[in-house]
Image (tube, rainbow, N blue to C red):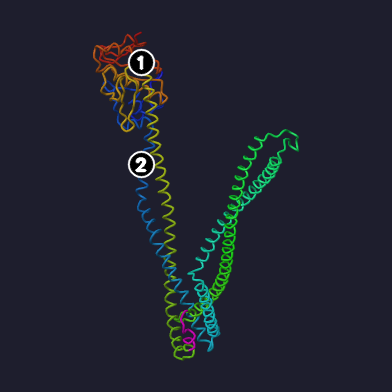
Amino acid sequence: MVIDDREIQVEGLEDLRRRITRLIGIGYRAFNWIVYSRQGRLNEILEPKREDMDAILQITLLREISEQLSTIIKDLKGIESEYRIMKTQLIPLREERVRELQREVNELNAELEDLKDSLRQAEDPAVKRLLKKVRELEGAKAMLLEAVNSKKSILARYGLKDPESIKHEFERLGGRLRDLEANLRSFEEEVKELRDEEAKVFGELKVLEDGHKIRLELKAKGMARCPTCGQKIDEEILSSIITDEKLRIRDLTERLEDIRESRKRLESELESLNREIDEVLRRRQRLNMLMNSISEYDMRISEKESIVKSLKLDVEGTLRRLGLNLGPDDPKLYEKLIETFQAPREIEEKRRRAELLEEKLKERRSELEKAVNELDNLKTRLRDLERKSKVISLASNLREKITDFIKKRREDLLRSIALRAQTIFMSLTDQRIYTSFRIDPENYRVYVKPHGLSDYIPASRVGGGHQTLISLSLRLAILYHLGVRSLIILDEPTYGVDEENLQMLLNQLSKIARHVDQALIITHYGRGVEEASNIIEVYRDQDGFSRIRMKF
């Protein structure tokens, strides 16, 4: 291998790969697939292998990490199942068993202590207290029953079912009272208006009658001039005025009578409304007194119920502590207690019961200790499994994020590369044949959309010359993405192109220099040499050795 006129020894393929990577800044696979295109394989980039492209685009490492995480998750899957079963089934069952045993031990111990106390004392103070509380309970129940019956009696006296019906009737009367008071105000306003109108009409009528009387006197006396103003009086005009006044007096009189009748009628209705309002008020007052009485009974009942409840709890607890199978609601509880604590046979049974309880308590304490030890061992194992389960959760989340990142990274890269490839393609040729390029992120196949078509077609199905330019544009776009602009090597890039399009393709290949610093084109037939800046000819000398010479 010769670099800058200096010969360098290469020790095998791996050494060659390392030196190429160090020299041009990319891996051997990227060099072999993108930088260097072998004869007849230039267009393989249109349908490449997924694993090769993943490696070139530096996605393989992330995929390998994801696969390693999947292996870790698979190896720890059994642990996660064991953790779930232990947390949701085994430990809850053990905890419940410990609680049951602890509760049973506590109950046995309490019962045993009660029996021992009962046997130690010939006259147990608790029994005396119990008998006293039972008597108090009986008295409290009797007082409660009396209060309940009194409440029922007062409701029955008024023909009511329950206190709620009293409340409903009180509210109904309240609504009726509001309606009546509204009507009362309306009637009072109407009466006031009628009285005002009556006074007004009465005043008008009084003035008119007084004037009419004066004019009648003037007519009767036959006076030719008015005694007030001294004007001449026309008899015909005076008669006409008197006639009009009579008509007006009659109209006003009738109107005044109508107003008075309406006023009297409204005043009568007003009196009825006042009477009804008084009746509603009286009924509401009676209902309010009744509700107060019911409320007092409810308070008495509530107080008695509270006393009965407290005494029942007290009696029930004492009965339980003494190991008696009796209840506080037993109507003959007092008689049964007297009979029980005066019978010697009951005392002997308590002794035997105490012995059995001691044996049973010993067994349950042993079982409880064993169950607690088993539970502690399970919890220790659970903590260990929990740590490993968190590893699974972290690995799953990381794998999912890596998978999503790979997918998004691949899509973004391929979208950018396709756009760059289209730009390069348009710079290599003046023909605007394709509107856009697309690279399938699932298989890396290249598609193009020709002008006039709505769908993409595989780039591998277009003409040979176009295939070559598309492949070349794609390689240059990938090199641009990889940050490599130093070199591209094309071995017989015109392979498979017909003679008709050959010269046009060679002209377009000459524009590669816009995108890379150095383009090497290898040809066995001399095609395209006229477009080259430098020509290196490889030939055999007369001794059969390969030689090179520069042509300019």
Image quadrant in which you'd find residue 495 = top left
Q: Which residue is mark 2?
A: 67
Q: What amino acid is labelled 1 in the image?
A: Leu
User: Is 218 drawn above or below residue 317 in the view shown?
Assistant: above
Disc marking residue 428 = 1
Q: What amino acid is labelled 2 in the image?
A: Glu
Is residue 550 left or right of 345 when viewed as pictured? left
Give the percent coordinates (x, y) of residue 176. 54, 59
Q: Secondary structure at mark 1?
A: helix
Pointer 2 and pointer 1: residues touching (CB < 8 Å)? Answer: no
Is residue 489 left or right of 543 when viewed as pictured? right
Q: Secondary structure at mark 2?
A: helix
Q: CA distance from mark 2 to mark 1?
A: 41 Å
Give the percent coordinates (x, y) of residue 143. 54, 79
Which residues make up the magenta segment?
329-338
- Image quadrant where one finds the N terminus: top left
Considering the whole magenta stretch, tell me its main secondary structure: helix
Instruction: Inspect the magenta stretch and tell me whether residue 155 lies in it.
Output: no
Is residue 160 left or right of 443 when viewed as pictured? right
Is residue 431 left or right of 273 when viewed as pictured? left
How packed is label 2: few (under 14 Cα within 10 Å), some, or many (20 or more)? some
Q: Nearer the viewer, residue 16 or 161?
A: 161
How packed is label 1: few (under 14 Cα within 10 Å), some, or many (20 or more)? many
